[in-house]
Image (cartoon, helix red, strand yellow):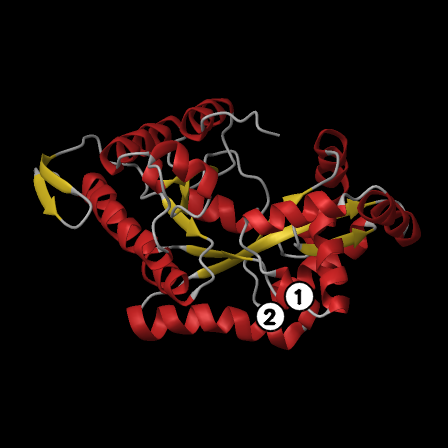
C-alpha cells in the first residue's frame, strides 16, 4: 500500500492513452511549487486535449508533510497557503505577460508560462471544516464530501446546501457536489448483500480501519457506539461512500436517488476493480444512459467539466 506513482506523470501517461475520460492529478500543494505544477498541468491538459483536472490537497497528511517540510502547518494556515498557491497557478494559466506576487509564503518575480491551457483545469477539494468549505466555495468547481447518508436524505440535502448556498451568496458562483460510492453488483440483491457482508464484515480489518480513519483525522470517538459500528462497516465497504449494492437495475435506481438528493457526481470504487468494473461498464452504464443519468459516449474528446460530471 506504500507503493504509489507520482501523480502528474501518471496523469500524463493516462491522458496519452485515453480520449474520453477526465484525468485528475491529486496534488499535496506544499510538496510542489505552484509555477512548476501549473506548467505540468498545462502539459497534461494539452496531451489530453483539455481533459485535465486537479484535486487539491492542502497539507493534511502529517507523514508526508514531515518528509518535505519537517512539520505540518496549523489547520487554517494550510488554506492560507493554498490561496496563495492557487493564485499563482491561476495567473500562470491566464496571464500572457509576466506577473509578480508577494505574499506570506511566496515571492514571485516576472513569472510567465506559455502555452495557456486549452481548458482551465477543473478544480476539486475535499474541505469539510468551515475554512475548507469557504475555500471550496470560493475556488473550486466541485467539493468532494463524505456525505451524511447514514443520517438520511434531509441531512444530505442540508450538507449539500451549506456548500452551494455559500458559493452562491458569498462568491456569486456555482459549485458541484461529489462524493464517494462503492459498487457491489451481482445478479440478485441477495447475492450482492452476501458478498458485501463477506468482505466488509467477515474479512474486514477493524484495526486497520481505525488506523486509517485516525490518519484521516476522522473523529470516530464522538460517535455513539451504534453509529461507530455503522460508520466502520461503510468505511470497510468502500471508504464510507454511499452504497450502490444490488442488481444493475437496482444500482441505477440508487444513482437516481442520490442525484435527486443533490449529488452531482460519485467517485466509484469496487473490491475487485479488474473484474467488477467490466461488469459495471457492460451492464450498468447503458442503463444509466437510458435513465438520463449519464451522457452517451461521444467520438470526440470532451472537457474535464463535462467528462467528470457525466462519469
Is 93 situated above or below 310? above
Give the quarter of the image for residue 96: top left
State the separation of the CA atoms marked 2 and 1.
6 Å
Q: In the shown orientation, is residue 302 left or right of residue 258? A: left
Residue annotated with mark 2: 156
Q: Position of residue 15 (x, y in %)?
A: 46, 27
Q: Nearer the viewer, residue 100 or 41?
A: 100
Is 23 situated above or below 43? below
Give the quarter of the image for residue 167: bottom left
Callout 2 touching callout 1 (CB < 8 Å): yes
- Point 72% across, 62% down: residue: 228
- Point 50% across, 46% down: residue: 308
Q: Which of 142 and 291 is in front in this view?
A: 142
Dot 2 surroundings within 10 Å: few (below 14), some, or many (20 or more)? many
Looking at the rendered image, the quarter that the N terminus falls into is top right
- Point 35% across, 37% down: residue: 70
Amino acid at each position: 500500500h506504500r507503493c504509489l506513482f507520482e501523480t502528474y506523470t501518471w496523469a500524463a501517461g493516462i491522458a496519452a492513452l485515453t480520449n474520453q475520460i477526465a484525468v485528475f492529478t491529486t496534488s499535496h500543494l506544499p510538496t510542489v511549487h505552484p509555477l512548476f505544477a501549473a506548467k505540468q498541468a498545462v502539459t497534461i491538459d494539452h496531451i489530453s486535449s483539455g481533459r485535465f483536472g486537479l484535486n487539491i490537497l492542502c497539507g493534511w497528511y502529517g507523514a508526508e508533510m514531515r518528509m518535505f517540510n519537517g512539520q505540518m502547518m496549523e489547520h487554517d494556515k494550510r488554506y492560507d497557503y493554498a490561496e496563495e498557491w492557487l493564485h499563482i497557478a491561476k495567473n500562470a494559466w491566464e496571464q500572457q505577460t509576466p506577473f509578480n506576487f508577494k505574499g506570506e509564503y511566496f515571492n514571485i518575480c516576472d513569472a510567465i508560462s506559455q502555452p495557456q491551457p486549452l481548458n482551465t483545469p477543473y478544480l476539486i477539494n475535499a474541505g469539510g471544516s468551515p475554512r475548507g468549505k469557504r475555500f471550496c466555495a470560493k475556488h473550486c468547481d466541485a467539493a468532494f464530501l463524505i456525505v451524511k447518508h447514514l443520517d438520511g436524505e434531509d441531512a444530505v440535502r442540508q450538507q449539500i446546501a451549506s456548500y452551494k448556498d455559500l458559493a452562491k451568496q458569498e462568491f456569486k458562483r456555482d459549485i458541484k457536489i461529489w462524493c464517494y460510492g462503492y459498487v457491489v453488483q451481482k445478479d440478485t440483491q441477495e447475492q450482492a448483500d452476501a458478498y458485501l457482508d463477506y468482505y466488509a464484515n467477515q474479512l474486514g480489518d477493524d484495526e486497520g480501519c481505525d488506523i486509517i480513519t485516525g490518519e484521516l483525522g476522522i473523529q470516530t470517538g464522538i460517535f455513539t457506539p451504534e453509529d461507530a459500528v455503522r460508520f466502520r462497516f461503510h468505511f470497510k465497504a468502500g471508504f464510507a461512500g454511499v452504497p450502490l449494492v444490488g442488481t444493475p437495475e437496482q444500482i441505477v435506481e440508487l444513482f437516481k436517488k442520490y442525484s435527486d438528493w443533490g449529488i452531482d457526481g460519485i467517485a466509484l470504487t469496487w473490491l475487485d476493480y479488474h473484474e467488477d468494473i467490466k461488469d459495471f461498464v457492460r451492464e450498468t452504464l447503458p442503463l444509466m444512459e437510458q435513465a438520463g443519468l449519464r451522457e452517451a459516449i461521444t467520438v470526440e474528446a470532451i472537457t474535464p467539466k463535462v467528462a467528470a460530471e457525466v462519469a
